[in-house]
Image (tube, rainbow, N blue to C red):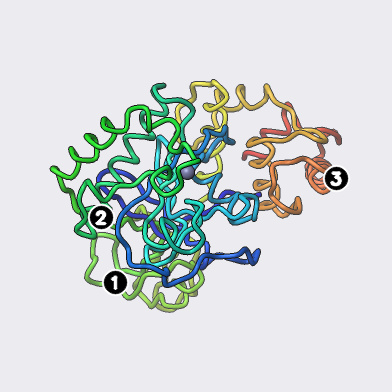
Amino acid sequence: MAILQADKKYVANGVTVNVYHLGDNNDNGIDMPPRPRCLNLIGVTIHNTPWIDTASGTTPAEQYTRATKNDNMGSVRVHYYVDDECAWENLPHDQGGWHSCDGNVGGNGSTIAIECIMKSSNDPVSLKSEENCARLTAYLLQKYGFTIDDVYTHNDWYKPKYCPIYILPHWNEFLNKVKKYLGNPSAPSEVDVKELYRVRKEWSDAKSQLGAYSVLDNAIKCCQDGYGVYDKNGKIVYKKESGKPVELVNVPEQNDILELQKILNNKGYNLVEDGIFGNKTYDAVSDYTIEYSNRGELTRWVQQRLTNKGYPCGEIDGICGNKTMNAIMKFQADNGLGVGYLGGTDWKYLCK
Ligand SMILES: [Zn+2]
C-alpha cells in the first residue's frame, strides 16, 4: 500500500500539517461524520492513541490516516493525528468527528479532535508528540478566538474513558505548554507541495514565465520558441528553439541514484548523497541481492528502476513476486547477464 501524499501542507506554530481530507479522498466509501458539524464549534478535544512502528519514509500520523482511509479504524474519525514529526489533518474544521463517544453531538459535534500519538507519559519521542500537539492546539485556539478554557479531554465528554491516557497525569503541564504558544503567535504559512514545471526564458527570469504546471507534458505544450521548461530546482528539462522541435535537454535520472543512496544510508551505510553511481555506492548495493519474496525499500527501488527502464514489475509494492522476478530475468537476459536473482554486477547495469 502506497504511502499517502498530502493534498496540501501548512505550518502551524512550527508543526508541519499534511492536509489529507478523507472526504476528498474517499475512494473506499468509508462512513463520514456530518458536514457541516451538528453543533457550533466551541473548542478542541485532546486524545491519546498508541504509538505504532512504521515503515521507513513515513510516520505514525500518516499510517493512522491511511488506516482510517482503508476503513481499518472502526468508526473513529478525528481532525488530526499528531506524532513527533508532523500532523495529518483528516477532516476540515467544519465537519464533525467521531472520537468522544457522543454520537454527532457533544464533543463530536462541537470540537476539533486531536489524537496525539504516544507510547508513554514521559519518553522523549512521546514528549515530542505532546509538544507538537500543544503547538497545534494553540494554533487552533488562536484561529477561532478560543482560550485555554476551551481545551477539552475525551474524559470531559465521557467519564468512563480515561483519555488522553498519557497526558492526563500531567494535564496542567500540557495546558501550560499550550499557553506558552498562545503567548507567542506565529502565523501559519502555506507550503507548496506540488512539484511544478515552470515555462520561462531563463530560470532567473521569473517575469518571463508563461505558466506553471504539475504535469510535465502540459508544460511542454505551453513552451514556445526561446523558452525552456524548468523543474522545481530550476534545472532545465526541455528547451524549444526556433526551427527546432522540442528537445529533451536533461532526463532527471540522477534522482534514482540519490534515492538509492538514501535507502542504503538508512540501512547503515555512510554514502555521500550526490546522485552519482560511483564505486562506494556500487560496493554498498552489491552487498544485497533481490530475489523471490524479498520485500522492502530496496526491492521497491528495483521495481521502480526496472519499470522505468522498460521492464514492468506490476505494482510497485516493495514485494518481489513473479512479475518482478520476470522483469529481473528479462533485464538480465537482454544485457547478457546470468539469469536468476539480482545481485553483483547486475547492479552496475541496473544503475548506469
Ligand atoms: Zn480519546
What mark, if any, has residue 189 been given in the picture? 2
Query: At which x and y percent is residue 96?
Result: 44, 63
Tell me the distance, in whole angstroms, between the alpha carbons under discs 2 and 1. 24 Å
In the image, is residue 114 above or below residue 175?
below
In this rendering, position of residue 154 left or right of residue 333: left
Residue in view at x 67 percent, y 21 percent: 287
- Residue 298, quarter of the rendered image: top right
Query: At which x and y percent is residue 294?
Result: 76, 33
Tell me which label, 2 or 1, sits earlier in the chain: 2
Residue in view at x 73 percent, y 33 percent: 346
- Residue that protrudes farthest toward the left in the picture: 183
What mark, if any, has residue 209 been given in the picture? 1
Q: Is residue 1 visible?
A: yes
Residue matched to label 3: 322
Q: Are marks 2 and 3 in contact (CB under 8 Å)?
A: no
Tell me which label, 3 or 1, sits earlier in the chain: 1
**Amino acid at the residue labelled 2:** Ser
